Image (cartoon, rainbow, N blue to C red):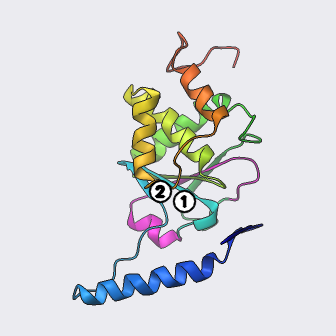
Amino acid sequence: LQPGVWGWAGAEKVNAALSAVSRDLGRKGGGAAKKVLACYKVVDGIWLGSTAQLPDAAELEKEGIVATLAVGEGVKAIDTGKFMHSAAAFGDEESASILPCFPKAFKQIAAGVEDGGVFIYCASRQGSCALATGFLMATLGLSFEDAWAKVREATGGQVDELNRNLKRQLTTWAKWPEFPGLPEWM
C-alpha cells in the first residue's frame, strides 16, 4: 500500500482479498459471510469512521443511525437525504483548537444518540476519535485515559494514539474548573 490523494493506493486489492477470505470463511462455517461494517461502535448510539471508508446509507440505517457528524474542514457530508447531517469544522488537526467545537458538536451528538445513533467521521480518524473521547469524558464523567481506552478499543487499533495536539487539549480541559463545560471566553 502507498499513500495517495484519496486514501491508500492499492487498497482496492487488499479489500478484495479480504472480501474473498471472508466469503471463504463464511462458506466453511456453513453460513453466509457477515459483512463487516465500515464504522466502529464506541458505545450505544455512537459510531466512528473515516472518509476513506464511508459506509453506505443502508448500513447506517441497519445500525439505527439517524445522524452524521463530519469533523474537520472540507469533510463532505454523506449525501443521501436520509440523515440529519452536521459538521464540526476545525483546521489542521496538528495545531487547531478542537475545544471551541465541543458545545455545538456535543449537542448534535446527544441529539443523534437520543434519536437512535450518530456516525462521527473525519479524514484521518483523529478528529472524530478526539470528539468522541471528549463527549465520553463530558457525559459519562470518564477520565481522558478511560474515555480514550473505550474509543481505541472500539476502533480495533485503527487509531492507536491521538496526535499530541488533540491529546494535550483533552487532558488539559479535564483539569479546568469549568470541566465538563468550557470557559465563557471560548
Q: Residue furthest front?
A: 1
* SS of the residue under disc 1: loop
Point out the residue furthest to the top here: 177
Which image quadrant is residue 156 in?
Answer: bottom left
Q: Residue at x 41, y 39 (%)?
A: 149
The tag earlier along the polypeptide, 2 or 1, is 2
In the foreground, 142 or 69: 142
Q: Residue at x 44, y 57 (%)?
A: 40
Residue 45 appears in the picture as rendered: no
Disc on res. 83: 1
Give the amino acid type for the residue marked by disc 1 in the picture: Phe
First to last magenta residue range:
56-76
Which label was assigned to residue 66?
Answer: 2
SS type, badge 2: loop
Contact (Cβ within 8 Å) of mark 2 with mark 1: yes
- Label annotation for residue 169: none
Q: Position of residue 37 (x, y in %)?
A: 44, 68
The quarter of the displayed image where residue 53 is located: bottom right
Q: Who's the residue at 56% across and 79% down the image?
A: 14
Question: Label 2 crowding class (10 Å Cα cut-off): few <14, some 14-19, many 20+?
Answer: many
User: Is 57 in the magenta?
Assistant: yes
Alpha carbon distance from label 2 to label 1: 5 Å
* Count of marks overlaid on the render: 2
Q: Position of residue 115 (x, y in %)?
A: 41, 49
Q: Is residue 122 magenta?
A: no
Q: Can you give x and y, in whole percent of width and height, for residue 49 in the image? A: 54, 57
The residue at 35%/48% (across/down) is 44
Image quadrant occupied by the C terminus: top right
